[in-house]
Image (cartoon, helix red, strand yellow):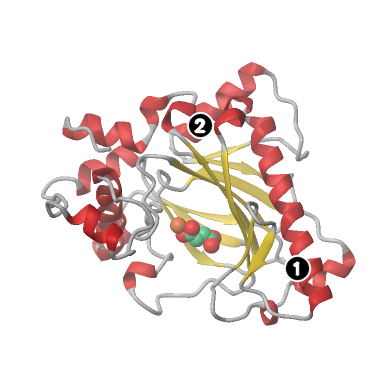
Amino acid sequence: MSQIETLDVADWSPHPDEQQSRAYAAALEAGKVLYLPRLGFGLQPQERRFLDPRWSDRKAKNISFDPATAHIKGAHGNASDLEELRRLLERFHHSAVGLIEHLLPRYTARLRRARASFRPMPVAGRAGSWRKDDSRLHVDAFPSRPNQGERILRVFANVNPRGEARVWRVGEPFTDMARRFLPGMPRPWFGSAPVLHALRITKTRRSEYDHTMLQLHDRMKADLRYQEQAPQELVPFPPGCVWICFSDQTSHAAMSGQYLFEQTLHLPVEGLYDPASAPLRVLESLTGRTRV
Ligand code: SIN
Ligand code: FE
């Protein structure tokens, strides 16, 4: 069964009825990708010049907008160009947040807005370390940012000006993947969480949930046979479309493409329409142990 659910939505502020919102939530919370082929993030003619890797400062992979400060990072250019680029990211941020609030109104009260990013670099292939290689199927889990079960919801928009799709592989449902990789997984070293925190390797304490999610991320990426043979579909997201997924749950890999906008949002497990669908609850029910 496909993990892609297509939505006929062409407006950044749509007004689905309650029943439609429930259906969207059911698909998203089952780990599917909501694909909106008719919704594009439009750039003004004078903004198209930002579709060029030269705006990156080359230190960070992405140019990012922090909604807490309204500043951008990772870009280089003169003050007026940077201000225009900042406004572009800010506009994407507001569009993406508004889209989620309209599609899934029940999330609104609990959503925590994180960074928006602009990715001007082509998707890198198998270069670098396997752990950082996002062209291998994985669920998102970040070593320095424990989230204690909080969800990672992401909105993506391909803005490629040359007709190039962002090509993803989308893998099997989270429960199937977890069943495969949980057996034999080591538990965190006793007392490691406060040490990692004290050493500033993690920004907050790494819970057992975070430990498990990192292990799943690594075990998926390290297993080349799994990469080849896991149930998966190749999905080209053409320019002028939007897609949304819980990237801590949806197994995904970015194979090719260039010029992407992405917005990250966080949601506590209790903010979901169905909290039992969260990776935290799935892992707890598969192992019979609480994890935060
Ligand atoms: C990822 O989240 O693994 C990468 C997504 C992308 O850049 O298309
Ligand atoms: Fe990822």
**What residue sits right under mark 2 in the picture?**
27
The reply to whether the C-beta atoms of the residues labelled 1 and 2 are less than 8 Å apart is no
**What residue sits right under mark 1 in the picture?**
161
6 or 278: nearer the viewer: 278
| Residue 103 image position (x, y, % from top left) | 66, 31
| Residue 243 image position (x, y, % from top left) | 60, 47
Is 151 placed left or right of 164 in the picture? left
| Residue 90 image position (x, y, % from top left) | 73, 55
Which label is found at residue 118?
none
Residue at coordinates 66% horizontally, 79% vertically from top-left? 53
What secondary structure is marked by label 2? helix
Q: Quadrant of residue 6?
A: top right
Q: Residues within 10 Å of mark 1 (few under 14, many from 20)?
A: few
Residue at coordinates 22% horizontally, 41% vertically from top-left? 179
Q: Is residue 97 above or below residue 162?
A: above
Is 256 placed left or right of 138 in the picture? right
Q: Residues within 10 Å of mark 2 (few under 14, many from 20)?
A: some
